[in-house]
Structures are given as C-alpha cells and as structure tokens.
Image: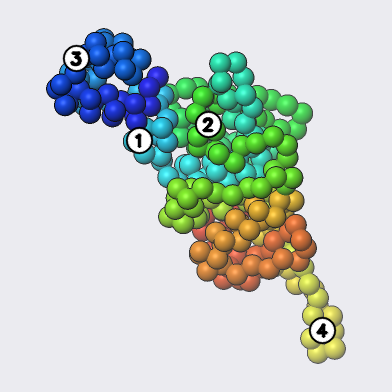
Amino acid sequence: MYDEQVRATARAAMAVGGASLNAISQQLGISRATLRDWRDRPDRARPSSACPRCTDGQLPVEAYTHLLGLYLGDGCLSRHRRDVYALRIACDDSYPRLIDEAEESVRAVHPSRPVHRVQAVGYTSVVSYWKHWPCLFPQHGSGPKHLRSIALQGWQREIVAECPEPFLRGLFDSDGCRVANWATRTVGGRTKRYTYPRYMFSNESGDIMRLCQEALTLLDVPWRMPRRNALSVARREAVARLDEFIGPKS
C-alpha cells in the first residue's frame, strides 16, 4: 500500500505531462498499471483499511479520544509478523458495559477488520490487528508506561482539546472509579457520619496523571492530589459534571 504522499507525488508528475508513465515508473518504483489507475481514477475512495494518519482520512474523534484514554490506562501494542501490531485493551470482567464500549471504539477507529475478545483470568482483552496502530498511538514503546516518557503529539492534543469528555471517560474506565466516601462532623455536640460520592483516578505515570489533570481543567472540573499517584474529584458540582459522561462502572 502506498501512502498519500507517494500518490500525490506521482499524480503531480503525471499532471506535468512532460514525462511518460514508463519514466515516472522507473523514477518512483511504481508499476505503470498502478500509475495509470491513479491517473484515470483520481477520485477513487481510499481503502477502508488505510491509515487516517498516513492518508488524508479523518479519525472518528470521539471514538479515538475514548480509545486513547483506554490505551493510556490499560492498553498496549505488540508487534507480530510482517509488521502487524496487536492493540490490546484489558478490561475487568466485572464491568461488561465497559468491555462493550471498548470494542465499539476499536471498531469505529478501525472498521475494516474484526475485533476479538480474548478471555483471561478475571479480565477480557479487546484485540485488533493492524499495521497502523503505532501511527495512531505514537506513545508506544518498550517497557511499562510509568518508566518512560508519555507525551501527546500536537495533533493528539488538538483532538483531546476538542473532545476532553471521551478522553477522560477512557482514563477513568481504565484506572478510575466512582466511590462513596465518608466523613464525620460534630453537630450540636454529637458526631455524625455522612457519605458523598467522589471520583478517584490512580496511575503511577506522572505524565499520564498530568494529561488527566489537563483534561479536567479544560472542563473547569476542580481536582486535588491526596497522594502522588492518586487524583480526587469530590466537590458536588464537579462530581455531577463527571456523572454526565462517566458515571459508575458497570
């Protein structure tokens, strides 16, 4: 498969009209039949398996940002034969809805190939194979994420800024939870206990933690850090805001 830059170079050379198909074929290493097809059918739709980063295609933004959050939390890429990569999202079996939503996001981003569910002890891996997963997740690297630098590229930051809600949903679906917290207060000389909901996000990677903080700040959701690796959202209005697009796991 040729990327869009190669196609554009070939079309530009053919548009000039001074060189023959044979000469362009020898120069670019592309068969004359392929060049003729590009010349005669310039508006042919790109293959459904083409990478939206290598071509001029468009990513489904909400599905991608949700999948990006899942990947940063419980995802990984592994290389297989012929430079095909497997994207794996590990999902706790206790939350079947989260497994369904992870599969939906993978399928939306890469619709031309099947999505597999691989059962393990206590969790299900949502798996998809594609040569271009590293194009969409350039954070891929060797070793655990918390032991290496994790930074979004410019195009990813623009997408997250456009849709921070599904990104946060992916992060909290992976490494967060909505819990009932409790506290005590003395009223009229008597100690009363009351409960309130709050969201917690835990991650050993300081870089991923900062990405979560930045996304919350984009939505004006206040947060605090009770521990180095734990983030808390506890104010009533802030919890209500997260309830609009995250909610309890199920």
The amino acid pointed to by label 1 is Gly
Q: Which numbered disc flags the more N-terminal residue, 3 or 2?
A: 3
Q: Which numbered disc flags the more N-terminal residue, 4 or 1?
A: 1
The amino acid pointed to by label 2 is Trp
Residue 99 or residue 229, whichever sits in front: 229
The residue carrying pointer 3 sits among few (fewer than 14), some (14 to 19) or many (20 or more) residues within 10 Å by Cα, namely few
Instruction: State left or right for residue 192 relative to residue 210.
Output: right
Q: Which numbered disc flags the more N-terminal residue, 1 or 2?
A: 1
The amino acid pointed to by label 3 is Ser
Q: Work out how far the residue at label 3 is from the one at label 4, CA to CA, in angstroms.
A: 89 Å
Q: Dot 3: what SS?
A: loop
Q: Work out how far the residue at label 4 is from the one at label 1, CA to CA, in angstroms.
A: 60 Å
Residue identified by numbered label 1: 57
Residue at x-position 63% and y-position 47%: 150
Residue identified by numbered label 4: 186
Instruction: State left or right for residue 232 relative to residue 115.
Output: right
Q: Residue 216 location, x and y as percent? A: 56, 62
Q: Which numbered disc flags the more N-terminal residue, 4 or 2?
A: 2
Nearest to the eye among marks 4 and 1: give it.
Answer: 1
Q: Work out how far the residue at label 1 is from the one at label 2, CA to CA, in angstroms.
A: 15 Å
Q: Which numbered disc flags the more N-terminal residue, 3 or 4?
A: 3
Q: Work out how far the residue at label 4 is from the one at label 2, CA to CA, in angstroms.
A: 55 Å
The amino acid pointed to by label 4 is Thr
**Quarter occupied by residue 95:** top right
Residue at x-position 63% and y-position 58%: 210
Q: Which mark is residue 103?
A: none
